Image: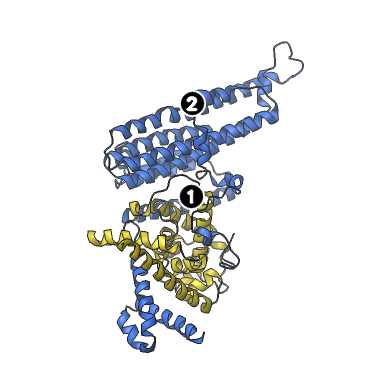
Amino acid sequence: MKKDKQLNTILEECLERILVNGETVAQCLERYPEYAAELEPLLQTAMITSEAVDIQPSPEFKARARFELRVEMARADEKKRRSVFAWQPRWAVVVVTVVVVVLLGGGTVLAADSDNTIPGNPLYAVKLATENVRLALSSSDISKAEIYAALVDRRVAEIERLIDRGKTELAQRTVNRLKRYLATMSRLSLAIQSQIGPGAEDVETVTPDEPSVKPAVSVQEVAATVRAEERAQLQVLWGRYIVNHPDEIRAMLEEASPAVKPALTRAIIDSVNSYVNSYQNVLQKLKESQSSGQTDDTSDQEADDSSGEPDTSNQQTNDSDREPGTSNQQSGNSNQQPGDSSLTPDASDLQSTTIK
Amino acid sequence: MQDEQGLVRQAQQGDKDAFAELYEAYFDKIYRYVVIKIGNKVEAEDMTQQIFLKAYQSIRSYKWKGVPFSAWLFRIAHNQIVDFFRKQSKRPTVRLEDVVVVSSDNPLRTVESRFDIERLRTATLQLTSAQQEVISLRFAGGLAIAEVARTMGKSEGAVKALQHSAVAALRKVLLVGEESEER
């Protein structure tokens, strides 16, 4: 027992000398000849482990991550500032953006913001920043959703080009980005639907014979029309993705070389599942709001039928892309990986490691 | 790097450059820790970014009180990984060997190391959860034994014993793997 304790300490001391001070295994063994037989295999295994984990993030990823962190830090500060000065006009942002664009050189920004600029290109970060500015300047949820739909189109085109060039890793990353856009569209849709509210459809059932029943009917009718338009716009946005893109990607799969097929298949599965998941989520919320409002509006069901009949079996196999806001719904649906028991907060293993 | 405590204090007061220095100091370590835990480089990149964003958003809530900044940061990483696996469903995942890039200019070494990290990850799955955590924090995260102890909420003596048993168990698993490959 005592020897074990000593060996624990000696092993740690040797590891520190080797990993931090650059000593060799042989030098350590010389220090502790009486433990050499037990120490040597342990140190060799530790060395193999240390070498195996000696991986580095790619310089491209590091550069992008650094840039995005700076953007996020600025955004977080801006948010804080806005909450203090909520009255600050939106035009101030526009002025600052214009100044930045002029300083950066309009030509560079325009060049970056083209379909030819794909991940891996040094100007790609500028392209993403330009898109972020566009999103920041959009004034409503519906216009944000429209921008996101356009960005989805862009990402799909980029994935196509990346796969074509055999850049599967960048393609996978772009698929991830695309998934985030779909999730955000889903969130925006839910926000818009909640603004519509369960009672909105009642207004549309009011007949001209009953004006006295609802004196404010004309105002409500106008409101209902606007909301119906928003809803129709949303359905078009969602429909466009499912109708166009999976077929495009499938067509690419048929022509792709065997080397890129696995990555392309993953891209299809990821993007379709992500879409179906988000879309089903929106539909579910819609149905809930309708049933609670006891209305008789079948337009969403029609949208479901006309949008390419998403396979609900796929939806059931993919819960992973849900947004943080929906995580409670799936807390009972934990699909942990083999061997990840250490990741479950465990009183005996990781006391006080949970900071939530 | 400037004194870590000083940097943390400056970052808490909104100094972005101070946070950027902390970010540079820990970025690779956190990335390696995440890769070895989840085995997918693309996901690991996204998660590494999320971890630092979360750290930036909540750095004001960090209080020294004997818990080093590294331990606080690795706990955030740990929590993110817990969430990741909670959300993870049966969707197809990218195998580690498909995606890991090794820091070597020598292509032969790259191939060899690719094999090693996948084998290492597979092997660590045979260890107990605490042993896995020690290997991930100590070797992938590059933390000193005292930092591992603070991160895991254990004594240094307990972590040294865990490290010993983890390395011994890992050796056994790797040896069994080699024997079955030879057959």
Colour for chain B in the figure: yellow
Chain letter, colour blue in render = A
Kindly identify the amino acid type of the residue bearing the numbered disc 2.
Ser
Name above or below for residue A21 compared with residue B137: below
Front label number (1 vs 2):
2
- Classify the position of the C terminus of chain A by image quarter: bottom right
* Tag of residue A75: 1
Q: Between marks 1 and 2, how big is the CA–CA gap?
A: 36 Å
| Element class at badge 2 | loop
Extreme residue in the top direction: A209
Residue extending furthest right?
A213
- Tag 1: residue type? Arg
Which residue matches tag 2?
A: A307
Residue at 65% across / 20% down in the picture? A221
Q: Is residue A30 visible?
A: yes
| Residue at 58% across, 49% down | A83
Residue B111's x, y, as percent? Answer: 27, 58
